[in-house]
Amino acid sequence: MKIAVLREGAAGERRVAAVPETVKKFIGLGATMAVETGAGSTASVSDAEYEAAGASVADRASVLKDADIILGVQGPDPASLAGLKPGAWLVAGLNPFGERARVDAYAGAGIEALAMEFMPRITRAQSMDILSSQSNLSGYKAVLDAASVYGRALPMMMTAAGTISAARVFIMGVGVAGLQAIATAKRLGAIVSATDVRAATREQIESLGAKAIFVEDVKGIEGEGTGGYATEMSDEYKAAQAALVSGHIAKQDIVITTALIPGRPAPRLISDAQVASMRPGSVIVDLAVEQGGNVEGAVAGEVVERHGVTIVGHRNVPSRLAADTSALFARNLYNFLSAFWDKDAGRPLLPDGDEIGDAIRLTRGGQVVNPRLLQN
Ligand code: NAD
């Protein structure tokens, strides 16, 4: 049973899907590990470290030859997988809605593509959840990115020359990334507030010592749909939210937005007029910029200035902490594959009818089989 680890090809992608620790663990299960030359170089892992862990390191063609499972962070270009064994598994973050043509190509090549971002949000799968592990560190990094372009300090500082007041930081969207952003901003000494559409987050915000800013008294709003995700809100709610947020944003120094709704563009939370209401030198970080953006004027891949406010729109924020995010991503992959390891078969098997397999399997037997893709 051979597992191949590819060097990522996407522009700006610095992560890698296996680290020496997981290489050793897969070998412990009986697998042979082959890593593409330079795969870990942007995540602080050298070829020599993979070799020391027991992997062979070689060019892509040798690594893919006879591979049973290919691990990636993002989906590789299907053309670069030519000659792969039919039925081989591709296990990666495959961006199934955004890269639908690739999914079709994987099916055409006879590959069984397993999309890790479709992992169900159930207790059994928590340790396999790439969205959580990567969002967690994105929330942390968003606060550091804001702090690094903010021309003032975050904590209150008392000096002989006088006192500097603490920065006000507002987090919009309190999922995994937002919770970590709250915790990080608190650690840096900021005065932190946060909002979400899901009522359940109020207690989480308060338990981290931040102030919850919530729309009250709008009827018929649950905010939470299936799987604990947000739903699209009513027009009445959106108007109430905009009014509430307008007054609050004008008093903030840093705003971090993380709001997403599965299968839809990111909700627009901050208008250009609201940006203009902030004092010059304020900073907004839009973590949803690649999904359409929460902030008017945010540009994916750029740091722009509007009305004296810096709007940070970095792409692929997890990749900005590639050593740690790779280690967590690699463990998510190992936790998934080892949970389904069949000792007799000497490989993982994903039985039909299993909630995890059925959720993440995109293609099989030359066909796209995932219900979420077939609906679209
Ligand atoms: P996400 O990335 O889909 O969205 C980020 C946040 O934005 C969410 O909290 C969402 O409610 C919020 N949001 C959406 N529209 C908004 C709006 N108009 N205004 C303000 N906020 C808005 O979220 P996520 O981090 O993936 O977490 C989603 C859910 O999944 C949460 O309930 C989380 O606790 C849960 N979860 C469960 C598990 C598990 O059990 N395995 C793992 C991770 C997350």
Image (cartoon, rainbow, N blue to C red):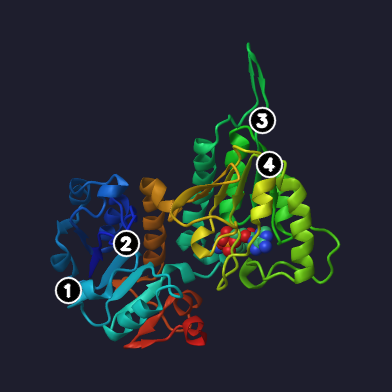
The CA span between labels 2 and 4 is 36 Å
Q: CA distance from mark 1 to mark 2?
A: 24 Å
Contact between marks 3 and 1 (CB within 8 A): the answer is no
Question: In the current view of this chain or complex, which residue is farthest to the top?
Answer: 160
| Mark 3 residue type | Ala
* Amino acid type indicated by mark 2: Ala
- Which disc is residue 252 wearing? 4
Which mark is first along the chain, 2 or 1? 2
Which residue carries the number 1 mark?
Answer: 66
Q: Earlier in the sequence, mark 3 or mark 2?
A: 2
Look at label 4 and name its amino acid.
Gln
Task: Give the amino acid at mark 1.
Answer: Asp
Coordinates of residue 86 in the picture (x, y in percent):
24, 82
Q: Up-down: is 229 above or below 111? A: above
Q: Which residue is mark 2?
A: 10
| In the foreground, 85 or 288 | 288
Vertical position of residue 19 compared to residue 125: above or below: above
Whether residue 344 is visible to the viewer of this picture, yes or no, is no
Q: Nearer the viewer, residue 211 or 56?
A: 211
Relative to 294, residue 360 above or below: below
- Measure the C-alpha gap from mark 4 to mark 3: 11 Å
In this view, the mark in front (1 or 2): 2
The numbered mark at residue 166 is: 3
Dot 4: what SS? loop
Q: Which mark sits nearer the N-terminus, 4 or 3?
A: 3
Label 4 crowd (10 A; few <14 / some 14-19 / many >=20): many
**Horizontally, is 146 left or right of 276 in the view?**
left
**Residue sitting at x 63%, y 32%:** 189
